[in-house]
Amino acid sequence: MGETLSANTALAATAADVKTAAERLRGRAVLTPLLDYPLLSARLGFRLLVKAETLQLTGSFKFRGATNRLLAAKAADPALRAVVAFSSGNHAQGVAAAAQMLGLKATIVMPSDAPAIKVANTRGFGAEVVLYERHAEDREAIARAIAEKDKALIVPPYDDPFIIAGQGTVGLEICAQAAALGVTPEFVLAPCSGGGLVGGVALAIKDQHPQAKIYAAEPAGFDDLRRSLEAGTRLGNAPGKPSICDALMAEKPGALTFPIHQQLLAGSKVVSDDQVLDAMNFALRHLKLVVEPGGAAALAAVLAMRGELAGKNVVVICSGGNADPEMIKRAADRADPLV
């Protein structure tokens, strides 16, 4: 059990912070497309728009928050030379790439069972990778020790105002791109682990579209946000549960992200591994996108909600595409979920 947080608690980040982050990221982060699929939408019975963060630098939205955090930190302390982060992979790559861009030393603490492609890519951006046992060691304690030794800045994966604001630039782009299509977003869904992405997106979208319903999507066994929203307090997940969504395995909602969720989210949808694999298959067949399991959670939720979305304008964030070939094949071998 965590502390009870009032829905009136002052938020760690605001829509104005998201706009400031967008200015920092201009020319650095990719303005990813909001893809429109008219024929597919006709089959589904609702307007489907897909924000393809799979095409972001490093293959996920995490580059946005990491870069915003490091740019702000470097501006505040020009003497900054090193950073350290802990991540199962996408935040790791985002921090490594941002650090390389700014000439900073990066050390990333990653679980030994992280997908090989994420470990390789993190090292490819010049970072030193320190592996740990997910269920036996404390990654934050390891990171703190490294930070003390290297006099490095710790860059958390989600519970930081600059991280939240950086991830929120996804939502700011959705607003502008949907307007260009003449579409008002009615339902917006994003995958959720610690909640930086869905929280930041909610800040941006609810600022311009107060009536929009924003949902998180979580894997079964890691539905801490759903239970926390129902209870009004931060609740954790039981340890040791399996999930193919390696990117969505935070222990509980963030202390800074949860008040945002309480104020702005309509709820959280929970999806099974089978539904996630079907969503990955759907993305390959019909969206022509490679989406990793965690990145496909929101799409899985939308496919499961199909009956209640009839006639609506629905935006799905596919948040990452860093899947190992074996996982892609596992998804591709499944039957078409639309048949």
Image (spheres, rainbow, N blue to C red):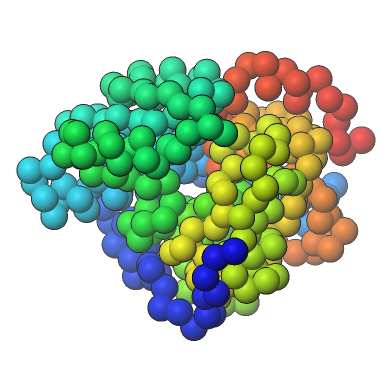
Nearer to us in this view, 255 or 138: 138
**Near-viewer residue (100 or 306):** 100
Residue 198 visible, this orientation: no
The residue sitting at the bottom extreme is 8
Compared across the picture, whether 100 is left or right of 33 comes to: left
Which residue is rendered at x = 81% and y = 35% of the image? 274
Q: Residue at x 37, y 47 (%)?
A: 156
Looking at the rendering, which quadrant does residue 82 occupy?
Answer: top left
Q: Position of residue 60 (x, y in %)?
A: 48, 37
Query: From the viewer's perspective, is 130 left or right of 321?
Result: left
134 left or right of 339 in image? left
- The residue drawn where x is 70% and y is 70% is 230
Q: Is residue 126 left or right of residue 272?
A: left
Number of numbered discs overlaid on the protein picture: 0
The image shows residue 105, relative to residue 301, as above or below, that is above
Residue 196 position within the rendered picture, expressed as x and y whole percent measured from the top left: 48, 55
Q: Is residue 79 above or below residue 76?
A: above
Q: Could you tell me which quadrant the N terminus lies in?
A: bottom right
Query: In the picture, residue 293 is in which quadrant?
Result: top right
Q: Residue at x 67, y 47 (%)?
A: 238
Q: Is residue 8 visible?
A: yes
From the viewer's side, name the closer residue of 307 and 260. 260
The C terminus is located in which quarter? top right
User: Residue pushed farthest left?
Assistant: 79
Place of residue 155 in the rendered image (x, y in percent of width and height, measured from the top left): 32, 45
Residue 92 is situated, as x and y percent measured from the top left of the image, at 40, 33
